[in-house]
Amino acid sequence: MSILAAHESIAQTQYSSNKMKFDQYSDEEIILKILAGEVALFEILIRRNNAHLYKTGRAYNYSHEDTQDLMQDTFVNAYVNLSKFESRATFKTWITKIMLNNCFRKKQKSGFKNEIPDEIKTEYTPMFSDEQSADMNKTILTKELGLVIENALQQLPLDYRMVFSLREINGMNVAETSDILGISESNVKVRLNRAKGMLKKEIEKSYTPSEIFEFNLVYCDAMVKRVTTEIKL
């Protein structure tokens, strides 16, 4: 067993133990415990949102290294402002907004413009069906091809890429995506339809959403260490 594989195995064992211990708590319950003094539990929130924020940063066209820096800043921002979290939205939605605000500032962009809805499909069908996903599991996928797909996504205009990422890769619903991006639900549907049209031929027959971006447990552990060191948990 390689050193990397051994590290992954140890990390998986440790995380599985913690995960079993805290799976019974919702994000809101964990936040209340943190605010009551159990600050070490912030690690659970980091681990629950690591992959999601990573996909968001990469979809915004940042490199792996820049995305990790933005994630660290986002987790620190969330920790510092945790008392301001209100349960009107999910913690995932709240922290995604923080991540996107950090991405926006880094790119010096102010936000998204609304579009006139057209050709909106009333019935939404996920781009990747369960049947397709099952078939994909039988396919031998290479990192080289994974990079082709990721690069294809980066060619989309940012507005469409972010909607595609939140809806198709991160599994957020229309209302959550609308809330995060500050656009109407109709615009979410418009942009998703257009993004799917741009990418459908390249990816729907070969890849599942989780395979588009990689974020394994080694990176997750590294992010936990970075954030906990920064906020001195």
Image (cartoon, rainbow, N blue to C red):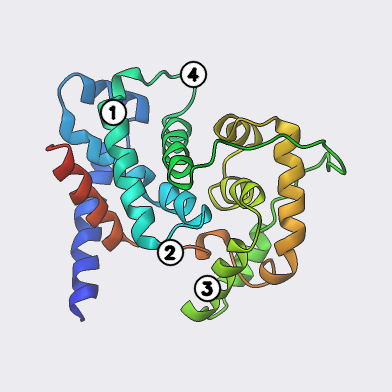
Q: Residues within 10 Å of mark 1 (few under 14, many from 20)?
A: some
User: Disc 2 and disc 3: Cα gap in Å?
Assistant: 9 Å
* Amino acid type, mark 3: Gly
**SS class of the residue under badge 2?**
loop
On the question of residue 45 being in view, the answer is: no
Residue under the point 60% across and 66% down: 134
Q: What element carries label 1?
A: helix
Q: Residue 213: horizontal and vertical position, in percent?
A: 48, 62
Q: Which of the marked residues, 3 or 1, is nearer the chain's N terminus?
A: 1
Give the labeled residue for mark 3: 146
| Residue at (81, 42) in percent of width and height | 123
Q: Residue 118's image quarter?
A: top right
- Residue 130 in the image: x percent, y percent? 64, 58
Please report contact status of discs 4 and 1: CB closer than 8 Å, yes or no. Answer: no
Q: Image point 74% across, 41% down: which residue?
A: 189
Q: Which amino acid does label 2 sit on?
A: Glu
Q: What number is the disc on residue 214?
A: 2
Say which mark, if any, is on residue 88: 4
Calculate the distance from the C-alpha at mark 2 to the C-alpha at mark 4.
31 Å
Between disc 3 and disc 1, the foreground one is: 3
Indicate which disc, 2 or 3, sits on the residue closer to the N terminus.
Answer: 3
**Viewer-closest of 82 and 66:** 66
Q: Around disc 2, counting alpha carbons within 10 Å, would you say few (fewer than 14), some (14 to 19), or many (20 or more)?
A: some
In screen coordinates, is 1 left or right of 215?
Answer: left
Q: Which amino acid does label 1 sit on?
A: Ile
Q: Check disc 1 and report the residue beneath it.
A: 30
All told, the count of numbered labels is 4
Look at label 4 and name its amino acid.
Arg
Q: Earlier in the sequence, mark 4 or mark 1?
A: 1
Indicate the position of residue 155 as horizontal and vertical percent values. Answer: 63, 63
